Image (cartoon, helix red, strand yellow):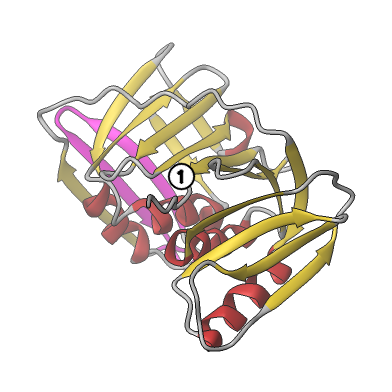
Amino acid sequence: MLLEIDNFEQFKVFFDVIYDITDLIELQLFNTHMVCSILDKAKVRFMTATFKSDFFAVYEVDDAESVTLFVEDLHKIIKSANKIDNVILCTNDDYLVCKFESKNGNTRVFEFVLPAEYIDSPKSPSISLPVSFDLKLSDLKQGINDLKVVGSDEIQFSISDGFLNITAGVETTTNYAYSIPMNVEGSMSSKFSMDYISQLLKFDKINSTGKFNMGDDYPLLYSFEDEIMGVKITGVIAPRIEVD
């Protein structure tokens, strides 16, 4: 494979989110697109990133191929890239080569060993949920910041009377509710880990508005897409359910 990336911030954001939740990732490369899927160790979060071939300045693959990578190694190298760098990723025998080319002509090259083991990418769960809505990340960020003030480590989303309500998922000494008008019907709620939901704010580099699906005590489905650049990130977050 040979990938040249000149829009590196959107590529980097996916690895910013997954680097501490999985050890290995498989890059599945097809003629028209590349897919990366992960399931975290606790089996609470599933995530897929799809990059169309047009997302890359150069995209060369031999039919369909796959490459298994150490996520931590790749993330360390990705973090060292400057925003103005042109980034080239390619395989060379048992190594992944990562090359940074700056506009002033300087070049940095990293080579790291590919893992000896291979993984099969996890499959996306098939879930049909009754409610879908668009949510601005600025609104989600407001609710998260307020809940941090309240002291909640859980966040609850509920639908009622045409509103999406963001409240604390646990009992706190201060009551809080953030109600956002939504063109939705029904009444339902689910609560989630604040840490997991907070990670979604990083996807503002893809789109400032996400598409969500939810049900009553069901997982939360989300997607962020930049149709012009050809990148889409989708995922599932399992709810927190109290058992008496």
Residue 53 found in image quarter = top right
For the residue pair 122 and 219, the one nearer the viewer reads as 219
For the residue pair 155 and 28, the one nearer the viewer reads as 155
Residue positioned most to the left:
116
Residue 172 placement, left or right of 120: right
Residue 165 placement, left or right of 105: right
User: Which residue is depicted at the point 54% across and 65% down?
Assistant: 155
| Prevailing secondary structure class for the magenta stretch in the rendered image | strand
Say above or below: 194 vs 134: below
User: Which residue is depicted at the point 85% across and 44% down?
Assistant: 185
Q: Residue 50 location in percent, x, y?
A: 54, 34
For the residue pair 76 and 86, the one nearer the viewer reads as 76
Q: Residue 146 location in percent, x, y?
A: 61, 82
User: Which residue is depicted at the point 43% across and 11% down?
Assistant: 63
Q: Residue 60 location in percent, x, y?
A: 46, 25
Residue positioned most to the front:
244
Question: Range of the magenta residues?
Answer: 86-105
User: Which residue is depicted at the point 52% across and 17% down?
Assistant: 31
Q: Is 169 inside the magenta-drawn segment? A: no
Q: Which residue is mark 1?
A: 238
Question: Which amino acid is tagged 1?
Answer: Ala
**What element does badge 1 sit on?**
loop
Residue 222 placement, left or right of 5: right
Q: Is 104 inside the magenta-drawn segment? A: yes
